[in-house]
Image: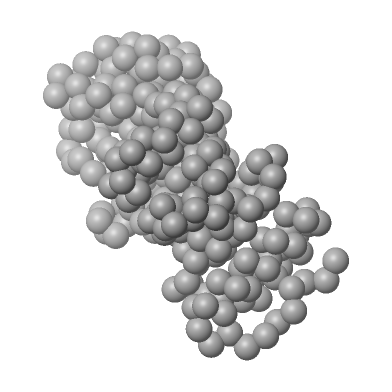
Amino acid sequence: MSAVPVTPMKTRKHFEQRCASIAQEYLILGNVEDAFESFVVCWRKQWLQYFTKASLHVVLDHEFSSIESFVSLLMYMHVRGALPHPSIETGVELVLKTLPDVIKDVPQAVKYLGAIIGHLIANNLVPETLVAGVPALVGQELGSRVVAEVRAAVALPLPITTYKKHVDAALSELFSSGDVDEACLRFKEAGPKHLGAEAVKRAIIAGVEHKGKDRELVSRLLMGLVSSSTIGRDGVMEGFLRVTRRLPDLSLDNPGAAEVVGRFLARAICDEVVAQSMLGVCSDSG
């Protein structure tokens, strides 16, 4: 398959038409690499949400079974940096706003769009909070129908969302009481061990946002989590990597974030929480 032909693109309308063509060819032929290459050719940072919008309108006219393939396309583009989270969420909202008109020609749009949103949430491409705003975008009656379809597609809240809330509560209590042992117990109660990297990430970020004794508490917490087998060393290492990848955004509100994270990592190495090789791994990741 050849990439979608390149034509001059002077307006947003041209961009949307090109994006619709890319999505249409992908859903018919299934070649995600070609779809990505075609998208890169016409990529415009200021219009990315309209790729989501245009491609969503295309998938609403296809078979229900094409939804998972469509979500895979968005995921492919997202992990390669071509389609950031905000452009996906905003694109979905743009389609929701037009839903009352869309269902006149596409009766299955409510079912399809609800299922798509559910899959996007499950794949962490849009936040769960999007669901709460659906009625305001499409009206109460239609919104309740969309939300019902979302909930039919994915069980909400997601386990990771509940886990994050428990972890944040445990961190808040730790900073208040200073009781590391109790915090370790709270982390163990929060959820399964394989989610530990998210807990470590949140603990380190909280340490960046706090100062003084709270940072010492975070370092002691990491040591306690590993020594109590609440979280494995691999989980701690992955947690550090996740923080490192977020440093550009984290540094906007906390200019010294990179230095603080470096100190946390050095302390974790000294405490034998992670291997010394993590210095090189985090350096490559950042």
- Depicted 7 relative to depicted 71: above or below: below
Quick one: 9 or 56, which is closer to the camera?
56
- Residue 43 located left or right of residue 286: right
Q: Position of residue 183 (x, y in %)?
A: 28, 17
56 relative position to 97: left or right: right
Q: At 39% across and 47% down in the image, what residue appears?
A: 262
Q: Is residue 264 visible?
A: no
Q: Residue visible at 70% across and 82% down?
A: 6
**Quadrant of the frame with the N terminus:** bottom right
Residue 139 x/y as whole percent: 31, 46
Q: Residue furthest front?
A: 104
Q: Position of residue 69 (x, y in %)?
A: 69, 46
Q: Give the mark count.
A: 0
* Frontmost residue, 75 versus 225: 75
Residue 38 seen in the current view: yes
Q: Residue at x 68, y 68 (%)?
A: 21
Which residue sits at x=74%, y=62%? 25
User: Percent position (x, y) of residue 221?
Assistant: 33, 24
Picture quadrant where residue 130 is located: top left
